[in-house]
Amino acid sequence: MDPLILVLFLAALVSTLILFAIVLLYLIPVRFFIRYRYDADRQDLETTAAWGIIGIRSTSREGRSQTVLLVFNHVFFSFDGRPEKRETAPPPARKPADIRAATDLIPVIRNIARPAIRIGSILYRMGRFERCEGRIRIGLGDPAATGMLYGSYWATRFAFTASRIYIDMEPVFDREVLAIDISVRYRIGQPLRILFPAARELFRPKVRAGIMALAGSAGSGALVI
């Protein structure tokens, strides 16, 4: 085969695949599923993002995390993360982007507020809250207070169901307890219309610097009010 024809064929094949991926990103929605469980013995968080036949599921349980790649709802690849013991080290020297006091938040918030609002408005327009469902067992340790909370919830339950929030509450009058099992489903149509604007905002140097500063302060816990 003529080398020029081979190069043209490969270029056409790559272009076709890219165009096909773009069309799929425009047509196939992304669905999110979040489940949170909490009681006296455990605290679990499961997050799944599914796009067509492909999905990514992340779970956090008892200090351990696991991320799996799903294809046709079967595990294709799995990665387990475990907490590691780290030796204490002296705090690093402060950089201009570091956050050590509440006043340092002002320029960071100023840089990321507008991009966050723009991305949030796009998510609001293109996304759709499908439903929230689950169960809560709660006891305040005081029968009267527990009864008032339970009655207030049932008095306003119609407002929750109108918003596709279906949560059953079980009161416990004889002791203090809290057990939660709640799942949320959210759908984003035409993810391509969100991907490009979000990437454009996130690639701005000031936005990246602000996100890194917030992540660093959250990880070190060094923020002083």
Image: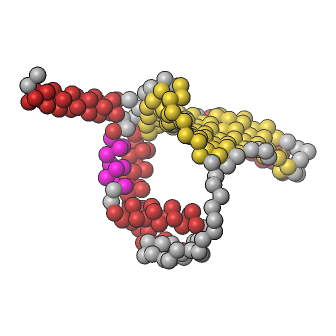
Q: Position of residue 67 (x, y in %)?
A: 55, 40
Q: Position of residue 30 (x, y in %)?
A: 44, 34
The quadrant of the image that shows the C terminus is bottom right
Q: Out of 153 and 83, give the one closest to the viewer.
A: 83
Q: Is residue 37 left or right of residue 206?
A: right
Q: Position of residue 24 (x, y in %)?
A: 33, 29
Examine the image and state in which quarter residue 115 appears.
Answer: bottom left
- Image point 45% across, 75% down: which residue? 95
Examine the image and state in which quarter residue 38 appears.
Answer: top right
The quadrant of the image that shows the N terminus is top left
Examine the image and state in which quarter residue 43 appears.
Answer: top right
Is residue 216 among what the camera can see?
Answer: yes
Q: Position of residue 76 (x, y in %)?
A: 50, 29
Q: Which residues are magenta?
A: 193-202
Q: Is residue 16 left or right of residue 49?
A: left
Q: Is residue 213 left or right of residue 158?
A: left
Q: Is residue 39 above or below residue 9?
A: below
Name, please, the residue furthest toward the right: 174
